[in-house]
Structure formats: structure tokens, C-alpha cells
Image: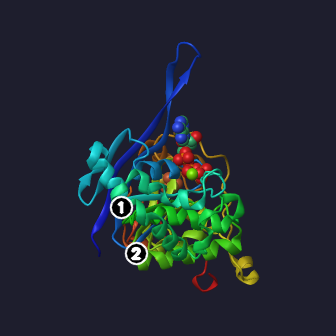
Amino acid sequence: MAEAILEVRGLVKHYPLTRGVLLRKQVGSVKAVDGVDLTLHRGETLGIVGESGCGKSTVARMLVNLERPTAGSIKYRGEDITRLSGRALKAVRRNIQMVFQDPYTSLNPRMTVGDIIGEPYEIHPEAAPRGDRRRKVQELLDVVGLNPEYINRYPHQFSGGQRQRIGIARGLALRPEIIVADEPVSALDVSVQAQVINLMARLQSEFKLSYVFIAHDLSIVRHISDRVGVMYLGRIVETGRDTEIYDRPTHPYTQALLSAVPVPDPEARERRERIILTGDVPSPTNVPSGCRFRTRCWKAQDVCAEEVPPLAVPSRPREEGGPAGHESACHFAEEKQVVAAETR
Ligand SMILES: Nc1ncnc2c1ncn2[C@@H]1O[C@H](COP(=O)(O)OP(=O)(O)OP(=O)(O)O)[C@@H](O)[C@H]1O
Ligand code: SF4
Ligand SMILES: [Mg+2]
């Protein structure tokens, strides 16, 4: 397997929960991210999926150093970037760029496309001499499939898909090694989603990029991910190669997510077992004891409230339902085919 370019261990982000207007008193904390381990290998795409509020964007912001973690480490090429500051941090930041979710709000409406894409050069002038920037920006427009002559236009003159191409061009400006894309297609029409995903796949091989690709829907990450991590309430609950997660999921939460993935074939849709989760996602200020999924899990038993299931490869023999060969944080991890392979 290729070199691990990013290694995340025990990543935690707790936001203080305060009360009172004048005398702010901390009354608890929002456990947005609560012990995440991830590894990104060079040239691969790691998909991260999970429901709204499970901490995906918070992880993304820490990976690109927009936010400091409460605890844990993020090693980029073996060096913990959470401990860096000043020039060393700036140098690392250049190599890890972000593409944001909403192309409608993430582009400044008063800046031209040329200024938006060229903005990273203001912070890292060494990446492009001033006289060369216009040409570089035009090249980037071309690379993402936009007319280089659009350089003086404003964001409102573009469609959603085109705007996201502008966001991607900006992410590429400094020729990073890693791109963290936080739901890059969620705000787009289904027909446009595929175009943007295809563009990202092409750019990946052209520029030898490694991606962390975040989505709330398993069907979206499927097309682009080599490996997938499923998040629930601030933690990764299952992780493995894309085929392992889609064909042999072992965690009940992953199985429930998969059972909701759209299946185009009506007959296969009929045969598919829908797993409807009951109850709401618990608040990250008040996380259940033991397994944090237990309040919605149909398999929960007493042990689930008492012991936190570690993210590990299930150790039972195959006759008893395991081992699955990939990591799952469940005391009763068991393979289950939710969507038949030929129907996807
Ligand atoms: N700055 C902050 N202060 C307090 N709480 C925060 C802050 N940022 C995020 N949170 C909380 O942390 C949790 C995780 O938020 P996050 O935005 O990372 O989730 P997400 O998985 O990206 O959700 P979505 O799919 O809706 O984008 C949420 O409960 C959110 O309200
Ligand atoms: S550990 Fe228990 S509650 Fe958690 S997912 Fe497994 S069976 Fe369900
Ligand atoms: Mg988010």
C-alpha cells in the first residue's frame, strides 16, 4: 500500500457550552469530534460519511488547520501539524487545501473569478510571481473545464456546478498534495454532481492528489472512494475498503445507512430490506454511555451501555458471523448484505 500521507490519531474537538450573558459560565461541552482515527494514503480517496451534525466538517477544519483540536494528533508526512506554528505551519497549509460545501456562499460575490482563484497567491506569493498570476489562473480555469476568458466575471454569472469548479480551481492553485472536500457536491443537482465528481477524479490522477471526500450519503462517496469511514456522533464506527463497506458492512449504523441508498432497479428495490432507524441522533452535549449508537440500535444489549466498543477487526470466526476483515466499533459486528452487488 502507498505511503500514509496523513495519519490522524485520537482527534478530539470539544466546544465549550456556556450560559449567562455577562458572567459566562461553562456548563458543559459539545463533543463535536470525540476520538477519531484516520489514515490517508498517497493518491487515494478516503470517503467520510455520516448524518448531519456527526462532526464531519469539524474534522475537515482541523485537517486543514482552520481549527485547533482539543486533543489528538494529525501527522502529515510523519510530522504532527497540530504543534506547528508560524512559517512551518504556513508551509504545511499550502499542501493541504479545502474545497467547501456550498458554492453559493463560499465565493465572495464582490470578487472576480480571477481574484478568487488567485487569492491563495496573496498568502503564498512564492507560489506564483505577480506577473505570472493571470496566466496561472487562466490555466486553472481551463483545467477545471471553464473558459479562461471568464476570468473577469463575478460568481453570480455562473451556475452552481460552475461555481464549484471555481472552488476546485482555487483549491488547486497552490498545487497541494491533499484536498479535503467537505460535501463538494451536496448543494448541486444530481445531474451536475456526477460531472463534478468526474472532474475531481480526473484531477486526482492528473495532479497526483490525495482526497478526503466528505458526504452525508453513501451513494455519493461510492463512486470516488477507495476507502470509506462511517461517522456517528463524533466517532468513526466502521472503516474499510469501499467494497467491504458496501458489500459486507458489519456495523448496524452502516447497514441502516446503506438500506437508505437509492437503488435504481425497481425489482431490486422491492427485495431490499429497509432498516428504519428510530429516535433522533442524541445531542453531542450528552453522549450515551458505552456504544453511542445504542439508543437507536435494534441489536443493543446490556453490554452496549456499559462498554465502549473499540474500532477493531471483529475477532470471531467466520462461522459465527466474523471476522469481516475490516474495522467496526460494535460488540456484535456481523456481516450483512444490505444492497445486492448486481443492483448498484
Ligand atoms: N463553533 C462551534 N461551536 C459549538 N458547536 C459547534 C461548533 N461547530 C460545530 N458545532 C457542533 O458540533 C457538531 C458537529 O458539527 P459539524 O458541522 O462538524 O457536523 P457535520 O457532520 O459537518 O454536519 P452537516 O452534515 O450538517 O454539515 C454539531 O452538533 C454542531 O452543532
Ligand atoms: S455495540 Fe451494541 S448498540 Fe452498538 S452498534 Fe453494536 S449492537 Fe448496536
Ligand atoms: Mg458539515
Label 2 sits on what residue type? Phe
Residue underneath mark 2: 207
Residue 229 appearing in the image: no
In the picture provided, is 268 more to the left or to the right than 335? right
Residue 115 appearing in the image: yes
Q: Residue 105 placed where, x, y %?
A: 64, 51
Mark toward the start of the polypeptide (1 vs 2):
1
- Quarter of the view holding residue 239: bottom left
At horizontal 67% and vertical 47% (from top left) the residue drawn is: 279
Residue underneath mark 1: 127
Q: Residue 270 placed where, x, y %?
A: 74, 77
At horizontal 74% and vertical 83% (from top left) the residue drawn is: 267
In the picture provided, is 221 more to the left or to the right than 261? left
Image quarter hosting the N terminus: bottom left
Q: Nearer the viewer, residue 211 or 167?
A: 167
Q: Residue 300 placed where, x, y %?
A: 54, 52
Image quarter hosting the C terminus: bottom right
